Amino acid sequence: MMRRSHLVIFLAAALTAAVPDPRHLSNGSVIPDEGYSDQPYIVKTNDGAWLCGITTGPGREGAGGQHIVTRRSIDRGKTWTDLVDVEPGTGPEASYAVLLKVPLGRVYVFYNHNTDNIREVIGDNPPYRDGKVRRVDSLGHFVFKYSDDHGRSWSAQRYEIPQRDFEIDRKNVYQGRIKFFWTVGKAFTHKGAGYVPLHKVGGFGEGFFTSSEGVLLRSANILTERDPAKLRWETLPDGGIGIRTPPGGGPVAEEHSFSEMSDGSLFCVFRTIDGHAASTYSRDAGRTWEPAQYMRYADGRLMKHPRAANFAWRAENGKFLYWFHNHGGRFILEHPRRRSIAYEDRNPVWLAGGEEVESLKGRLIRWSEPEIALYDDDPVMRMSYPDFVEEGGKFYLTETEKEIARVHEISPVLLNGLWGQFGNRTVAAEGLLKTEAGQPVALPDFLRRAAGGHGTDDLRTGFTLDAWVQLASMAPGQVLASTMTADGRGFALETAAGGAMRLLLSDGRTRNEWLSDSGSFEADKRHHVAVIVDGGPKVILFVVDGKLQDGGTQRQFGWGRFSGNLKSVAGGPLRVGEVKGLRIYGRALRVSEAVGNFRAGS
């Protein structure tokens, strides 16, 4: 029976389904659940269905009754069959499942199971007032069941996968007699074996998990052996230490995501609390791993990411996609309420495109500038734990904000732009406005009165300023382009202190501004700047010399939000300062297009 709160959520989703932006979360297809909804991961079964595993339950994350269910869809996630219990909600906690289909068609589901029904374990005090942790969904035994009918039913018996003790297990408060762990992402096959990711935990305290590292559970015979009791398992990497943060990094390395590369290497990316995700490569099927490094763009700049799932997938075309959140979450860890906010700001979702390049050690992945792929109007809503699915030449992402899981079709234009970014030297033509100094600029409104005169239509429109600049001085206050009127309507792009630029937006009632990163512009140096005002997620982006700004070491965010109450930036005649080749678009360019404009030259 659907809870009343969930009925409200589903009705709200139905009412917002017509948002005119495919990136908006409400435009996805809902994957039904029991209340709490986590980790909606999909495998394509041999009978053509999508099989989705979900951790669900009637309460919040970690509450009693949490268990694993699956559903099937034969229409790419538009509708789903009734749920099938992998484990019942009346048993001990069963949580955080990943799926693996083997060539014979059998599907395995791997998950945490609190088999011993442990009700509390020892934690730190503080934050736990009596030193006891009563959330018990990340401990116990790692188990699996299997289905030979494409997920319509699951084996009655569950089977345990033995874990080899690592240093992090032996150092926990139970010396490894009770193990702390969980899993996310995708199990996978590689060189004739099956692999299941696992994240070992050292203890519970500030931020919940106080230390963590990644391992792989490898079965050499799971692809061919029919008797589940005869499966052989080993824990990788070799030795007693898992995949950890780079030298000097923090104690948290978790939610490892693995991708197979064309030369047989394995790529792994994982979250930290250091303000950046980290990655590493294995050249010997997971037995050893190169020293981890923080994730970087192709030009060597660090990529920023908080303590949130960040996954990479290899597409059928051999390219890669990387899901992350594009801000430096380590800065918020200094907040006095860091335990509750360390996992925040998972909206919007950004994707970067990757392609393989040669190195002396083997192939590496170089990453493009990112694009916003999904967003919601609620800035504190958190979406995460995605999956990537390809079907019939189309691309899909799943995600959850812990109460509603959805499937989203992702524009091939966006993805192909990411994958083609390194070779893009074309000036974007769509939406280019005819502009002339001294004349008004016909920019679209952001809002309008709804049909019938009641309410407001959010048009999800935007615009872009694109120009080359070379200023003799970076003194603040120089106007580069402006339509601002005496009563404060219009837009203005001007220089700001510290070698930055400022964009001002105003409709005469609502005023917004955002600055580029300090030091972005140097006097007597030629620069390209694209300022993207995206009325979907309500963000302002600066792309300078082909690089999307992310705040660097100066600030947590390089992108800023503007008010949803901003009606328009209709202003007066256009005034143009010391800029060359000014282009104004009546839409928000994609970041890949701004990069192409830069690479095309003046």
Image: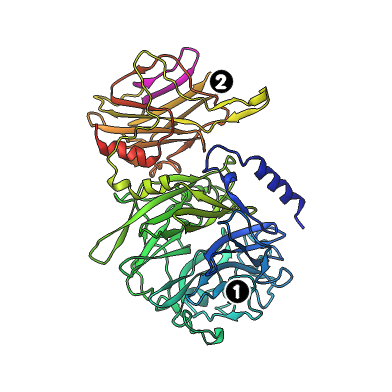
Residue occupied by mark 2: 509
Tell me the element at label 2.
loop
Crowd rating for badge 2 (residues with CA inside 10 Å; few <14, some 14–19, many 20+): few
Decide which of tag 2 and tag 1 comes sooner along the chain.
Answer: 1
Colouring style: rainbow
Question: Which label sits on residue 581?
Answer: none
Residue at 48%, 22% in the rendered image = 569
Q: Amino acid at mark 1?
A: Asp
What percent of the width, then of the height, locates residue 255?
49, 63
Q: Are marks 2 and 1 in contact (CB under 8 Å)?
A: no
What percent of the width, then of the height, locates residue 589?
40, 35
Relative to 272, is 444 above or below? above
Residue at 51%, 79% in the rendered image = 163
What percent of the width, then of the height, locates residue 550?
40, 43
Residue 95 among those drawn in magenta: no
* Mark whose residue sits in front, 2 or 1: 1
Measure how far apart labels 2 and 1 are at the Cα level. Answer: 61 Å
Q: Amino acid at mark 2?
A: Arg
Relative to 349, is 70 above or below? below
Residue at 40%, 46% in the rendered image = 370
Question: Which label sits on residue 149?
Answer: 1
Tell me the element at label 1.
loop
Magenta part, dominant SS: strand
What percent of the width, then of the height, locates residue 194?
46, 76
